[in-house]
Image (cartoon, rainbow, N blue to C red):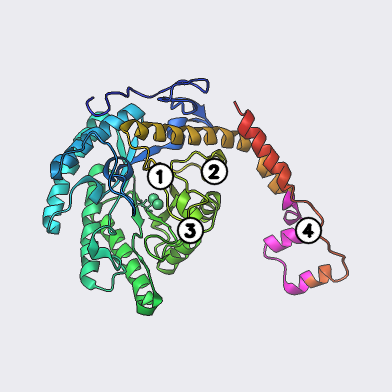
Amino acid sequence: MAYFPEVSKIRYEGNKSTNALAFKYYNPEEIVLGKTMAEQLRFAVSYWHTFTLPGSDPFGLANMIRPWDGYTGLDLAKKRVEAAFEFFDKLGVQYFCFHDRDIAPEADTLRETNRNLDVIVSMIKDYMKTSGVKVLWNTQNMFSNPRFAHGAATSPDADVFAFSAAQVKKSLEIALEVGSESYVFWGGREGYETLLNTDMKLELDNQARLLHMACDYADEIGFKGQFLIEPKPKEPTKHQYDFDAATTISFLQTYGLADRFKLNIEANHATLAGHTFQHELRVSRIHGMLGSVDANQGDPLLGWDTDEFPTNLYDTTLAMYEILLNGGLHSGGLNFDAKVRRASMTPEDLFYSHIVGMDSFARGLKVAAKLLEDRVFEDAIAERYQSYTTGIGKDIVDGKATLASLEEYVIDKPVSMAKSGRQEVLLAKLNQYLLEVE
Ligand code: XLS
Ligand code: NI
Ligand code: NI
């Protein structure tokens, strides 16, 4: 174990532990609602934030101190793989996620780039076999290279569309090869900066065309993983087409893709869209479209995708509440699409950040499970909508009412609405559960 010599295996030590390199709440073997915490939470490490990105931002250069510093090209890619599997093992995480360009360097032609990928993918496969670590999902980076300045599938240039298609093809082959449980499409630069130069209809049609091609190719090669779309409203473009869950669901329905795709909901993208994390999870869930989660958080004072590690217990609790109501995430999981702050540049910070993220979701899981067990919100909601279970309300729900029948029912009846929603009572209960659940 050569890359993180100062860290040994992270263990669960309970909430009295003062060891920063121990879990306080995440106890992988503990049973919650009939499954182990590890099975309920399905944590994944994101390759890009943890092993690839160097800490640069629009104002500053790369500054992360990493055990693979000093290597370049394929050597660097190999060192990262070795370090990654040591990291997964020490952290006790069963899954990871990656873009094609995270794991292997891009060369002058796609043919050479794909050769680089083959070298690294075969190395990754060997490590997966010996470690038992699996790929939650992989995806393609069609936003970093300058060729994607105007988009990928939505580029005005057909050659760029072709290049994108070829890149998706290769990534799907990798997904099959490494047995990815899901496969993500995040729109990258699929959006626009100004409508003055944009054929929006053609761009949306083309985006759908590429996704249909991906479905066809997955069928052809026998890739059975769940396809996911990750909504995001803006950044890098001013407007991204997959704005939020509702927009994305309607896009998928419009283009006959709704049966093949679910959504990958990222907390920070929800807040960028002006929604809560719970809202996006709820919208996805009630449409049967909640597939996976990018577990991070934004900063309410910063208007961009800061991708912080999740620490807000209200958010993790209400997220786990939606996820449990969804019957879990099935082939999805909780992927830490999160990065250490730029000033947290040491290798140990990679562990501290994942530990607090995992503990925050573990605590959220426990509290949400108890809230559900006690039907804290369910009973309140059932009571609030009780009028739809009998009489005229039941007629409405059963489709037996008409405008005329409802007019007749109400015409001489005084109707007022003076029932409290009891919001503060429910918030007080949420606090009580957060503080008291064992
Ligand atoms: C960027 C996205 C990206 C996707 C994968 O904001 O979150 O990291 O999760 O391409
Ligand atoms: Ni993401
Ligand atoms: Ni993001």
Mark 3 crowdedness (10 Å alpha carbons): few <14, some 14-19, many ≥20: many
Q: Which mark is residue 320?
A: none
Name the residue carrying label 2.
315
**Element class at badge 2:** helix
Question: Residue 246: x and y, percent?
Answer: 50, 61
Residue nearest the observer in this picture, 304 or 266: 304
Using the numbered discs, state the Cα–Cα distance from disc 2 to disc 3 in whole angstroms: 18 Å
Which residues, given as a range, are shown in magenta?
384-406
Instruction: Give the amino acid at mark 3.
Output: Ala
Q: Quadrant of residue 148?
A: bottom left
Residue 375 in sight here:
no
Q: Which mark is residue 391?
A: 4
Task: Tell me if label 3 and label 1 are in contact, CB under 8 Å.
Answer: no
- Residue 405 falls left or right of residue 101: right
First in sequence, mark 4 or 1: give its number.
Answer: 1
Question: Which is closer to the viewer, label 4 or label 1?
Answer: 1
Using the numbered discs, state the Cα–Cα distance from disc 4 to disc 2 in whole angstroms: 38 Å
Residue 92 lies, with reference to residue 178, above or below; the image says: above
Instruction: Give the amino acid at mark 4.
Output: Gly
First in sequence, mark 1 or 2: give its number.
Answer: 2
**Element class at badge 1:** loop
- Residue 371 falls left or right of residue 206: right
Residue at far bottom of view: 196
Task: Tell me if label 1 and label 2 are in contact, CB under 8 Å.
Answer: no
Task: Tell me if label 2 and label 3 are in contact, CB under 8 Å.
Answer: no
Using the numbered discs, state the Cα–Cα distance from disc 1 to disc 2 in whole angstroms: 19 Å
* Residue at 24% over, 73% down: 157
First in sequence, mark 3 or 4: give its number.
Answer: 3
Name the residue carrying label 1.
332
Question: Which is closer to the viewer, label 1 or label 2?
Answer: 2
Name the residue carrying label 3.
245
Question: Which is closer to the viewer, label 4 or label 2?
Answer: 2
